Image: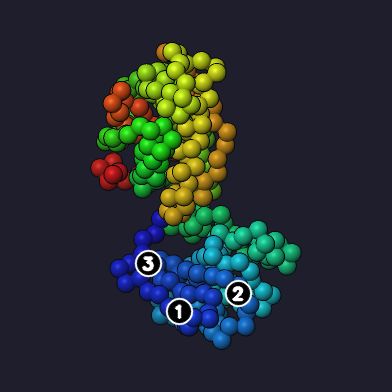
Amino acid sequence: MSKPQSWKFWRNWGRNVPFEWVRQSDHLVLKLSGDCTGDEKVSPLDGFQKEQKETGLKLLIVQCVDCGHISGNFLRELLAIYKTIKSLNGQMRLVGANESIQGFLKSNGVDRVLIHKLSLRGALADFGLAKSKDIDVNFINPFLNATVKVFKIQCFIELKAKKPFLKSNADPALLGDVSGIISITSETFAGTLAISMPEKIFLQIVKNMLGEEVSTISEGNVDLVGELANMILGQAKVELASLGYRVEMALPSCVWGKEHKIKHFGSGKCMVLPFETEWGMIYSEIMAQTISGELKSVA
């Protein structure tokens, strides 16, 4: 993913203008907010031409997350910007538009011109600025933070995160007696999240969450570990979105027993996040196509 230069530049032409320009090191961002009517005193096209002339950048992301509505007049402005970018052999993508805006583009027959992506990372991948099916170490931290938070709030258990590591063929096939597994998919990434723990900790979780004293893992309580995986992914989604990952969730599954195996989706590397508790260790595993960067940068 591209990184903004230290001189990231913001421009806004007055309080009543529902957009602003942001310069990144290798692309421009037009951030929309509120309702864009096309009657603004400042033309988005004029703004783009000025920004492009000063920076030479010809890749544009139109960030629509905070935009509620665009009018026909504003749509014509966007199309004019698109034509200008096309003449420069550049590219333009819309990101995060609501269903109403997406439907408006489709009804006007311009959805194949003003291409919409669910996530910033998806748009950057189209530009060649982020690798499709690539995952950086910054992707790991949201899962680490979410696991600690979910266990503290939902399970009343304090976790101490230990140093993450890449799982090798020499490592055990599994790291616990019961595991919850859930798939992770987005425009640019596919993989799985698994949370695995020994029976002793799981039984403590059942007691803390459900108020029940149980002596063994069974079909009657094992679904709880799948729900934990679901809650962790749900919690992580918020932070992942800020990093440009739009994550879709699926139904979790559960496996248990001394001989069970975790079957991850995909064939990439597996990152293990160890956590220490007063009853022993639990482990979260994230399978990715690739994991780039230095492991020491994972907090």
Return the disc, 3 or 2, that comes first in the chain's sequence.
3
The correct choice, above or below, for 230 with respect to 206 in the image is below
Question: 122 above or below 150?
Answer: below
Relative to residue 176, is residue 78 drawn left or right? right
Residue 155: image quadrant is top left
Closer to the camera, 51 or 39?
39
Q: Mark 1 is on which residue type?
A: Asn
Label 2 packing within 10 angstroms: few (<14), some (14-19), many (20+)? many
| Viewer-nearest residue: 209 or 219 | 209
Residue for badge 1:
12
Q: Quadrant of residue 115?
A: bottom right
Q: Residue lying at the far right in this picture: please name it.
A: 107
The residue tagged 2 is: 36
Residue 187 against residue 265 in the figure, above or below: below
Where is the N terminus found, in terms of image quarters?
bottom left
Q: What residue sits right under mark 3 in the picture? A: 25
